[in-house]
Structure formats: C-alpha cells, structure tokens
Image: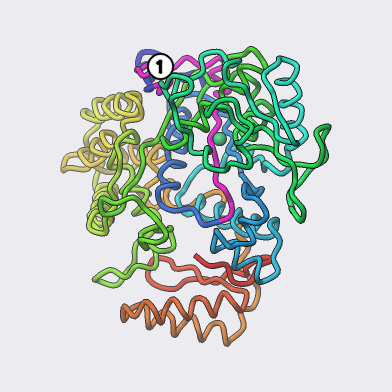
Amino acid sequence: MRPCAGMRLILYDSASRGNVPFAPADPERVRIYTCGPTVYRYAHIGNLRTYLLTDLLVRTLRFLGYGTFAVQNITDMGHMHQEQLEAGEDKVIAAARAAGKSGREIARFFTEAFFRDCGRMAFLPADAYPRASEHVPEMIALVRALEERGAVYGEGGYLYFDVTKAPGYGIFSGGVLGETTPAERTDERIHGHKKRPEDFTLWMPAEPGREFQWESRWGPGWPGWHIECAAMSIRYLGPEFDVHVGGADLRFPHHENSRAVVMTATGKTFAALWLHAAHLLVDGKKMSKSAGNEYTLDDLVSRPRSGGNGYSPGDFRYCCLTLHYSSPMNFTWEGLEAAARARSRLQGAFRRAALQGTSGEDVAAALRSEFRGAISDDLNIPRALAVAHKAVRPGIGGEVARALAAEWDPVLGVGLLPEAEGDRGAIGARDGEPEGVPPAVEAMARERETRRRARDYPAADALREKIRAAGYDVVDAEGGTAAFRKIPGIGTPER
Ligand SMILES: [Zn+2]
C-alpha cells in the first residue's frame, strides 16, 4: 500500500528542533532505530513509556500505508568494571553473582523479562533485536575506521574519540566544547588521559577476571557504550536511516556521541530525524530504587484495586496514551485508576455500539478524517483517543462501530473490541508456559495471593522471593494470580 496522500505526517525532529514533513528514503521500508534496554535489571515504567513511542510510530506509519523495518538493540554486556561489579554496586548483579550466575546468564534472564513486558504492553515486535555482545567485531571495525580518519587517540589500552573531528558536534548538547560536563567524567582511571571532557571512550582494556572481553589489535578489551549503538545501527540500517528513537535522557551524551561516531566514520548523515520521549516521574519525583518508587509492570499488575480486579498492562498503556509523548508524564496511582476506568468505559461503549443496529455512516467519514489528522500531527495519540471516545456517543452503531474499532485499534492497541487488537502481544506468546509446577510452589502462590489481597505486602513479597528461590516466578494478571513461569538459568534475582 502506498502512503496516503493529502494528509502529510508531521514529526517533531529534536535535532533541528522543529516540525518536519515526514519524507523517508523508501516509504515501503521506513528504517527505525530505538535504543533498547540494558538487561541487568527489570525495565521500569519510564523505560516502557519510551519504548511505547516506537510502537506508536510503527503503528501510525503502517496505518498511513508505510512499510517499516524497526531495530531495537539489547545492551547485554556489563558496562561496569570488574571491581565495581564485585563491590556489589548493582544489587541485582551482586545477588546473581553471589548465587554463582554469570553475566551472560543474568543478561539472558532480563532479556526474557524485557520481551515479556513488550508482549504485555502490546508492543509490535521489532524486526531485529541485535545483542551488543554479538556485534563486537563490527564495533572494532568501526573504531578502526575512526582511527583511519584520525579521530582516535589513546594510552594504556584506552582509546578515545576526539570530538573536534566530528562534523556538527554539539547538536543535542548545544554546548561549547570544553564547557560541558558529561556524566562520564567521574572515573579518573578511564578519563584521566582525555584531552577534553567531551571526548569519550571507544575501547577499554580488560581488567583481570573480566567476563565480557574480546581480542583486538589494541589487546583484549571491551567497547564503550556509544560505539555499540553506532555499530549496530550501521549493521542493520546502514549509515543513513529514517528515524532514531530514544528517551530524552539519552540525547546527550549518548545520541550526540553515537551520531558523531557514525558521521565521522562514514561521512553519512546517520538518522534523518530524531524522536525523543519525555521522562516519567512518579508522584512528582524522579524514580529511584532507594525511594522505592521505581515501578515495574509487575508492580502495577500486582497492585490491588478496590473492587477486586487488579490493573492490567493495557491500563498502563492507555494511561500513557492520554499524554503526548513529548510531555513529561507524572505517574500516580490515581492517574492509573482513572485511565483504567476510562479504558473500560471506552471498551464498554464500543461493545454496546457494536451490538446495535448499523447507523452513523454519515458522520463516520468526518471521524476517520479527525483520527487520521490527529495521528499525523506528530503522533497526537491523546487527540486520536478523544476521537475514539467521541465516536461511540449515541448515533453510531453496528457495522460502523465495528469498522471504526477494527481500523483504529491497530494504532491504539487498547482493545476497543474483543476481536480488535488489544493486550495480546506478539512477543509474549513466545513465553513458554512451564510444565508441571510443583504443588509446594502452587501453595506458596495461593498464600501469596491471599496476603496480597489483604494488602500485607511484606508477607506477599517474602513469599514471592521464596517462589523465585524455587526457580519459578509468579505472573499476576487481571483478576488474580494467573500463571507461573520457570526462571531460566537463574535462581533468585532481586528487584
Ligand atoms: Zn543507543
């Protein structure tokens, strides 16, 4: 299908800081790169909101008749020095290490957890999920290419990128060289040899005992973070592609630096357009482990609600859809409750309308045009959602209601009608259900459910840890505890 003419898709490009008419090189294959998860922890709801942006972009493009090819990387090698790791700076890793698990096993576990979250959020699967650890030869080749262009210097096995060699450096930071304070500045051992604060590490020597290390012409070592995304985007999309998506917090230094690497090494323009998802706060505060407000999808799903049923991932998805991706989101339980009710109202209205006699043909065209106009206006999903609510006021019924639901839900993914695309995620289906859960584990899960409903969270959490220690995880679903899954290769990861 050719993209529909007449209503141009406009997107806000955060590199040029303006709205631009979308003009991909090949409308049949719009190439998209999204910075993916670091798989040493569960994704929190802020991460999920960022990944939702790619999902909405892809769904919108398909609705408008474009073909897409989306890539999301998985950062699966430890970006920590061995002694930091052993000092237990990351509790999850420290716990897994103490249980004798390797970095690769930990990464595998959290990669699965990520896919499961994607499925529950009804994200359309990407066309490729490259793992950083499987693309180190490409990263080494890229550092070589930078060397040949005179953009690399180093000492003692450390290699740095000289940002003065990068065309247009500072597009995201807006900063003047020498005046910015990149986050990476603190580690003197790594950065002691740098000529200027913006220069960044391309390659580091492997310290004794390091699990993730590779042979290279500079000795055994490991790549810096920014070169990873640069190498994987080139590998899967080429040095020029259509849209780069990521969280606003990655704008600088990560996006600035991956862009600098690709442009300097290839002389090409890298991403034509940049989309950045605004951050998410919880109760007006930044999420953090220490504040106890770094919520995961499981935290939302297992939160009891008055009236029985818990929240579903679809409720959180809906909650995110009520706000434009470029607006910072303040997550509150009240907001989630309101979203869950609104979603249920919308679903109920569509179900009732579908059962009525067919009517409303005359107004459907205007509604369709409004919906298309909303999503074409920099993915204005809140407005599109408002159109959906408007459509099921009295006057529209039967075939018309069913047709609108079938057209719009592939964009919204909130389950307007049972047969429309809803919570079902393509990836989630891959999660194997375990065979034969031991009775003792089942008993613990039942007890946990009782405690949870009584809001005795400490007891419920303790039971969950025991279940995990037995090698299982318990998955909460709408209406109560639903399923178990075997934890592959790992015993008891902490949250
Ligand atoms: Zn990235």
Residue 410: in sight, yes or no?
yes
Is 254 situated above or below 459? above
Direction from residue 389 to residue 170 in the image, left or right? right
Residue lying at the far left in this picture: please name it: 394
Residue 328 placed where, x, y %? Answer: 30, 40
| Residue tagged 1 | 16
Q: Residue at x 43, y 81 (%)?
A: 448
On the image, which quarter does residue 440 sit in?
A: bottom right
Residue 347: in sight, yes or no?
no
Picture quarter with ligand 1: top right
Direction from residue 480 to residue 42 in the image, left or right? right
The local secondary structure at tag 1 comes to: loop
Direction from residue 284 to residue 102 in the image, left or right? right
Q: Residue at x 30, y 24 (%)?
A: 373
Residue 194 placed where, x, y %? Answer: 61, 30
Kindly tell me whether mark 1's CB lies below 8 Å from ligand 1.
no
Magenta stretch: includes residue 321: no
Q: Residues within 10 Å of mark 1 (few under 14, many from 20)?
A: few
Residue 404 placed where, x, y %? Answer: 33, 37
Secondary structure predominantly adopted by residues drawn in magenta: loop
Magenta stretch: includes residue 35: yes
Closer-to-camera residue (396/288): 288
Q: Residue at x 58, y 23 (%)?
A: 29
Residue range highlighted in magenta: 13-40
Residue 382 placed where, x, y %? Answer: 27, 37
Closer-to-camera residue (133/298): 133
Q: Amino acid at mark 1?
A: Ser
